[in-house]
Image: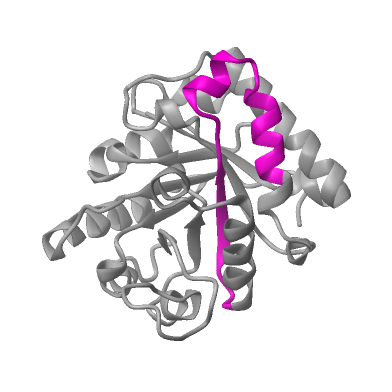
Amino acid sequence: MSSTPTPLIAGNWKMNGTEASLAEVTALAQALQNEPTRARVAVCPPATLVERASQAALGSGVEIGGQDCRAEPFGAFTGDIAAEMLADAGATLVILGHSERRSGYGETDAAVCAKVTAAIRAGLEPIVCVGETLEERRAGKAVEVVQGQVTHSLPDDLHGRAFSVAYEPVWAIGSGLTPSLAEIGEVHQAIRETLLARFGDAGAGVAILYGGSVKPNNAAEILAVQDVGGALVGGASLKAADFLWIIRAV
């Protein structure tokens, strides 16, 4: 793994998108074919669109990812999706441990860790999300909480594998609020130190993304912060035009 990570700009569509939304993937793919970028670009649509999105992006360099997966490869888990199924549909990445999963579905670090292992098993590149609540931030525990999540959500299987970590303060997601640049830098530095302690020199090659109300008008200043190696973008990734502004900010 390179000691200088390639920036990654990943769009998380969450529970948004139908067949008509594939036009945005096509527009993004066409734009990037004519406008090279130094960042890797990924779109993570709902599972119903993964296969069709991968076809729409074929040959463009735009990667397609899933938004979650089950730890088990198969079984009686109605409504869930295995990492192998995502890979079979054309995904190459998967978002794991998003705060909406941690808070809304009670996912623990151990559960996220098991899902990361599953992603590796299926040949998917995990984007592992971490972040503190507003209460934890106000209590001065943001760095402690995030370092703990990084430590316990990443399995040893990641040694020598491609993955990224996304810092998403829970209170900033969808709120329009963002931490100060200094606060973002402090947490990203702490994540980098944790990765270096855990994975040695390879920890320098892991992209650390920032997520939480990333928009065209604030992307450039956020991406310029030390150790910010990309962005995990929510609502602004739903429209190719908005997403392209963020990609261009790298």
Q: Quadrant of residue 146?
A: top right
Residue in the image at 30% along x and 50% along y: 13
Q: Magenta residues, as a range?
A: 122-150
* Depth check, front residue: 8 or 183: 183
**In the image: residue 230, left or right of residue 235:** right
> Magenta includes 149?
yes
**In the image: residue 160, left or right of residue 223:** right
Quadrant holding the N terminus: bottom right
Question: Residue 10 location, x and y as percent?
Answer: 44, 48
Q: Quadrant of residue 58?
A: bottom left
Question: Residue 60 location, x and y as percent?
Answer: 38, 63
* Depth check, front residue: 143 or 160: 143
Residue in the image at 37% along x and 29% along y: 213
- Compared with residue 245, is residue 13 higher up or lower down, i.e. above or below? below
The colour scheme used here is: one colour
Residue in the image at 42% along x and 80% along y: 85
> Magenta includes 72?
no
Q: Is residue 157 visible?
A: yes
**In the image: residue 105, left or right of residue 5:** left
Which residue extends farthest left? 20
Which residue extends farthest bottom? 75
- Compared with residue 161, is residue 248 higher up or lower down, i.e. above or below? above
